[in-house]
Image (cartoon, coloured by chain):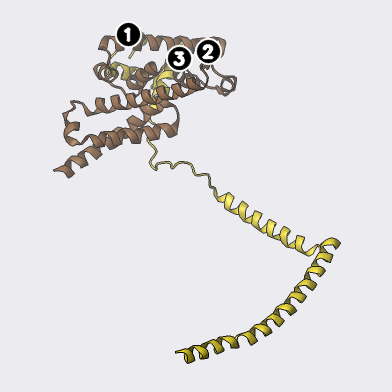
Chain colours: A brown, B yellow
Amino acid sequence: MQLIADQQFLDQIQAMRDKIFRITKRMLVSQEEAEDATQDVIVKLWSLGSEKRDRYKSMEAYTVTMAKNYCLDRLKSKQAQVLSFDDSIRVPKTLSLQKEIELTDELNWVTQLIDQLPEKEKMIIQLREIEHYDFDQIATILEIPEGTVRVYLSRIRKKLRKQFLEIQNHGL
Amino acid sequence: MDYKEIKHLLDLYLEGNTNLSEEENLRLFFKSTKELPPEWESFRSFFGYYDQAKLERYPQEITKRKSLFRPWMAAASLVAIVLSLQFYSSSLNALSTDQMDAQIAFDQFKDNMKKVSSLLNKGAKQVSYLDYWNETTQKLIK
């Protein structure tokens, strides 16, 4: 019985792994960190044991929530590290000159615009536009009401479009 | 789908009021339509980016922590060893006059010491009889 449960878990995880990787990479940006994060999330899930895992209504939503929390923890501790070295450090939100030069086509503009979104907004874009989760799944994962998800999403879509048009009209 | 319908869907989209299948329709429209009103070009870029982003996969072979060792380093270290050996042996051949004098003095000293030590050994051979003497006296004492 245990073996069957384990095999089921492996199948489920196989299907989830790419998603976890994309989501953690969106949040952590670095490829290597996202790979580590994906591994860690899978190990954590595994260590829950099959009984506990089966208790969750949606294993997928639970897994993504776990990945999200993992990333937020990582980002928080990173930020804390930076601040302990120099409290005055403020990461500038404007694009660096080097990157401006590299921006040649419009897909790159989009990449840059999404990269500079705050974590929560990045996550919403990833979950809706790339992973195609519906609103109540996103609400569960982010632990906010469904209506709030819609409001956020609308705000982000408008903001991204506005920024994109600004680049198009005036350059960076 | 005609443009009016698309326009309506896009308005809903920006308000966060489209469902997943409506968004899928928009995605397909921007993917398949070449000529677009210029004000819609931005949507094409966004949907295009999202499509592409969904293709990203977890690397099949887990990229190992990048090891600092590279094959060219093996070659480089081999070259370094050969060069340093060559340098070492050539520096041995080319002795300065000071070093030559020192070498001669050292050789002479070594010869002398050899003579001394061979004589010492001769003496030691004689002394080794004493062991024999010890043995026999012990037998007598018993």
The extreme front residue here reads B141
The extreme right residue here reads B97
**Alpha carbon separation for disc pair 1 and 2:** 25 Å
Q: Which mark is residue A151?
A: 1
- Disc 1 element: helix
The extreme left residue here reads A1
Quadrant that contains the N terminus of chain B = top left
Residue A48 shown left or right of residue B53 in the figure: left
Chain of the residue that carries numbered disc 2 in the rendered image: A
Residue A86 spot, x, y in % from top left: 52, 19
Label 1 close to label 3 by CB (< 8 Å): no
Give the residue type that dot 1 points to: Val
Chain of the residue that carries numbered disc 1 in the rendered image: A
**Alpha carbon separation for disc pair 2 and 3:** 10 Å
Give the residue type that dot 3 points to: Ser
For the point 28% across and 18% down, the residue is A138
From the viewer's perspective, is residue B65 above or below residue B49?
A: below
- Disc 2 element: helix
Quadrant that contains the C terminus of chain B = bottom left
Report which residue position mark 2 lands on. A167
